[in-house]
Image: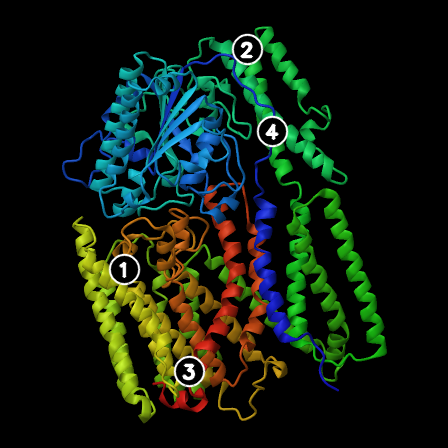
Amino acid sequence: MGERRPPILRLLLVGLVFHLVYIGTVFDCYFTSPVVHGMQPFRLEHAEAKRLVLIVADGLRADLLLALNAFPSIPGAPEVVAPHIRSIIQTRGAFGISHTRVPTESRPGHVALIGGMYEDVSAVTKGWKTNPVDFDSVFNRSSHTFSFGSPDILPMFARGATLGKVDMWCYDEDEEDFTKDATALDVWVLDHLRTLFHNATGDAALDHTLKQDKTVFFLHLLGLDTTGHSYRPHSPEYMANIQVVDEIVKQTEQLFSDFYGDEETSFIFTADHGMSKIGNHGDGDPDSTRTPLVTWGKGIRGPLPDSVPSSHDSYSEAWGLTHLFRRDVAQADVSVLMTSLIGVDWPVNSVGVLPDVDVVRPGYLNLKGGETSQAEAALINTKVILEHYRVKHEQKKAHTLLYQPFPFFLNSSASSPGIELLTEIEHLIAGGELSKARSTAADLIRSTLDGLRYLETYDRTLIRAIVTAAYLGWIAFGSVSIFATRDVHSAEESTRTAGLDVVGTLTLLLFWGLFALQRSPWTFYLYICFPVYFWHQTARYAVMSFTGHFMNKGSGLWTILKLFVQGCMVVGALGSMVIGYTHREIWSVWFIVLGIVWPIVSWPSEARFQHFTKLLPWSTVCLATAVFPMLSVDKEEDITAVLVGGILMVMVGVLGAFELSVDKQIRRSFRTAIGFQCLLICASMVITASSASSLRAKAGLPLLNQVLGWIVFLIASTSPFIVKLPGLNPLGRILMFFLGFSVCFVILSISVEGLFYFFFSATLLLWVEVEAIVRGAERNFPSKELRGYKIRADDLRIAIFFLFFVQVAFFGTGNVASISSFYLEPVYRLVPVFNPFLMAVLLVGAFYRCPAFGSTTIFDILSQIFKIIAPYIILATSLHLLNRRLHLPPFSLFLVALTLTDVMTMTFFFKVTDTGSWLEIGQSISFFCISSLLLVWAAGTCAVGELLMADSLDASAETARKVD
């Protein structure tokens, strides 16, 4: 009687769908949207100023704006780079640091500044540009808002606002050219503000609108962000852009003084995010999360002497401002500061806390009503956040079985949580106990914010349980699918299966009913299907099969002990890969183990001596590739390293053209194709050197270079797929793919990426050979049909090696611990003008320098799409070659890896955090998503390898003869 186990193709399909779907669990569990609707708005009774000017210098670092001698490496750099802003701090304003949250991108930063909320990460799927959920903002609450700046920022605040309330003037996207002087973008904003005021002198309606109270002016200055990406923050260009911004602030202040002729304007100057020293942002690098906040004008207090203990730390000691009080805030606090100044309704989604609520440290306001107004402002702040909690509390209570409110409000009114404390604050204000009122309000705000977090994470335990059951179920189901071989066609089995079907169906219906009562998201209905199905199938196939296996004669304690030891080794190997996500040196250790330890410990001594000529190159390339994970990610452009990589690629092409054994009928065509690819690599080297020289000289990208670069890039990348040589052996086919993508690693490399590509490819090809040596020339070949495949002990080890190479191909030479180690300089050689999608597709082809959540902007995350393909093409074709050399059916090694990867995935799921440092938060999300997607990549690797190598000759004998 035949075997009975789940069909393998069904296992593959279910596994891929499962891992793609379950990426969503991390967002449903840890990052639900904070936006709800239905809250009552509140406002202060009296405005301090008639109008507000918000100036946001995109990508401005606080230290480079305020430090003395901030640019010591630049000859002739001034001691004070922004004298006007510094004079404001010293004579008539208040200053501090605005601390941002990850992702340190433009959209989330502006949402926090203007909406007072920290946007959920689902906005990343819309490129941080389109509102996933409409939210309230200061602009929407103003009488009118006039905004000037980038088309990537301004439109998102017009959407959702009252029609006609927000006017915007945006320059064309083509103006965002990374090779040009970005200060022109900032000057454009000032010019259009000046034009607006000039037009008002002849337009009575416009003049009336401009002179209404509660008006907001928003100046978005993108130049520093663009300049920082292009030249990095410590460059002369970035310093010059700060000077331009300082002058724009000065002239803006003068424009308002001239037009209005009063002193009723409040000014707030800040940034949406900072920038790392390599010119990127997105992660939790302190240089990205610390931004300047400078306020002055109507309703703002003047400078205060520093406090005891000092408000300064080592970060601001070099600013020469330690004699003045530094008042730090969270970025969302800026929104409520603005609403307090102009007396508009506070954004209902805001979680910002007015700095002046604090009774210990001075805030930013100089209120007309003194401490009484401060206490009233604290009361309004409390009402806004408590109303936010009330709405979420009501929603959760209405749709949750056995709902438990936040413990702090357990004894409070069920319909109006915290109403007793609000009444107490009002009585304290009426009784003149103002400090106590503010203190009580501050305590209530902290508790209510904790309550909001409690409600946002209320369903977390349920989701974690579902996820745990699903991943454990998948591991069990995958194991059964591969190992279970016992015939189970019996009446007893049929009865047991029917009972399992009933139990599975009832379990699924029970959970669906629970989700319906709780009005859970539709994704919950989908999530629960997987664990129910996996455990149903496991119970159906496993019990009798594995019982029979262990009852066989010869199986006993020794077999169980052996399996336990092997399992511990597998878990240890996967655990080391988990550590490698944050400690890159682990990948280097792996290469050393593969190249040195493994041959010494595991290879038969005869194999080591007999195949020394293959062992030596194997050890050499492993040690060479081990160097790359240990290199610093803070790379400078190194054209010499790029060209050396190109030369090595050309040498491989020339050697392969003459040394590979190719059928006489296609030999000439093969050599012609290889020669043409080598010429394209040489051409790309010349173009790259010329383009890099021109860009460094700030002469822009020559049109001829751009056109030729695109032509060479496209021809080289497509030629391996177009040129067909029937009967070409597998190594010749792999060589064509290697050379075809080599151009990508010349044009789009900043430093050693091409060298990594060369050594990584060599490692993969030699891996095929050494595995063939270890396996030996056996005659009893495994089945070449996937249906008849049975796992061997060696297959488990090979599958672990395969997973290692999948991750190394993904990570390349980059820093997995940071999401801002992308480099845009190479992309400018083809796309000098900001084009998110095109830049995205380009950089992903060679390798993913740093796979984590968020980047310089969302296009920097996507910008790795093309550069990641090349190493995977080589891995895919090498895996195909390995299967053929070892006489394994396609997807066999992937099947073994299938049951292993989720040890890593589960680990990363429970390591996801939304507290602590924002760097840790961004990393934790990234690691889980990467681990889940690696399975999809691995499946794609197998499929692509089979497809691309379908027309090559059988490799079992040919390649073994000519691999050297």
Q: Which residue is mark 4?
A: 388
Given contact means CB atoms under 8 Å apart, are the residues at marks 4 and 2 in contact? no
Q: Position of residue 561 (x, y in %)?
A: 66, 73
Q: Amino acid at mark 1?
A: Ser
Residue that lies at the very extreme toward the top in this rendered image: 431
Q: CA distance from mark 1 to mark 3?
A: 30 Å
Q: Give the residue drawn at x 36%, y 52%.
A: 821
Q: Is label 4 or label 2 in front?
A: 4
**Element on which disc 4 rests:** helix
Q: Residue 423: give x, y in percent of width and height.
A: 65, 15
**Amino acid under disc 3:** Glu
Residue at numbered disc 1: 751
Which residue in the structure is indicated by mark 3?
769
Name the image colouring: rainbow
Q: CA distance from mark 2 to mark 3?
A: 80 Å
Determine the residue positioned at 73% across, 35% down: 398
> Tag 2, which secondary structure?
helix
Do labels 4 and 3 touch, CB within 8 Å? Answer: no
Q: Image check: 39 left or right of 868? A: right
Q: Earlier in the sequence, mark 4 or mark 1?
A: 4
Q: Earlier in the sequence, mark 4 or mark 2?
A: 4
Q: Is residue 765 left or right of residue 831?
A: right
- Element type at mark 3: helix
Tell me the quadrant of the picture where the N terminus can be found: bottom right
Q: Position of residue 439 (x, y in %)?
A: 56, 18
Question: Which amino acid type is shown beneath numbered disc 2?
Answer: Leu
Tell me if I can see residue 854 in this picture. yes
Residue 559 is left or right of residue 741, and the answer is right
